[in-house]
Image (cartoon, rainbow, N blue to C red):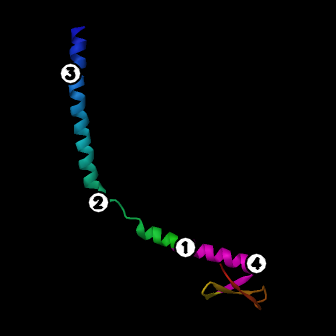
């Protein structure tokens, strides 16, 4: 029984030391690897640009029709065309 108590006492003393050592090891590894982690800001900017273009395209398709062609005239205005290439109307997108 006394060996068991001595074992528990030894583990009770060594556990905080081990926790501190693991914490220090974690901090050292993270400080070494952290600066090398990839920056995703360029990919995020590209995604935002593509998402804005897709929203504009969907809005133009709603205004002109599913199968109609359209051309961006700038300033959120599109020129709609029918399936023969004739101009049908200009639409202001909101």
Taking the magenta stretch, the answer to whether it contains residue 50 is yes
The first of marks 2 and 1 along the sequence is 2
Q: Residue at x 62, y 84 (%)?
A: 76
Highlighted magenta segment, given as a residue range? 49-71
Label pair 4/1, CB-CB below 8 angstroms: no
The residue at which mark 3 appears reads as 10
Q: Residue at x 30, y 60 (%)?
A: 36
Q: CA distance from mark 4 to mark 2?
A: 50 Å
The residue at which mark 2 appears reads as 35
Q: CA distance from mark 4 to mark 3?
A: 78 Å
The residue at which mark 1 appears reads as 50
Q: Say which element carries label 3.
A: helix
Q: CA distance from mark 2 to mark 1?
A: 29 Å
Image height of 43 relative to 25, above or below: below
Q: Say which element carries label 4.
A: loop
Q: CA distance from mark 1 to mark 3?
A: 61 Å
Label pair 1/3, CB-CB below 8 angstroms: no
């Amino acid at each position: 029984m006394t060996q068991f108590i001595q074992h528990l006492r030894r583990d009770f003393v060594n556990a905080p030391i081990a926790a501190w050592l693991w914490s220090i090891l974690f901090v050292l590894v993270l400080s070494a690897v952290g600066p090398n982690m990839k920056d995703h800001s360029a990919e995020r900017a590209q995604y935002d640009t593509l998402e804005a273009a897709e929203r504009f395209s969907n809005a133009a398709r709603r205004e002109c029709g599913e199968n109609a062609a359209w051309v961006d005239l700038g300033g959120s205005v599109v020129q709609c065309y029918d399936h023969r290439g004739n101009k049908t109307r200009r639409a202001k997108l909101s």
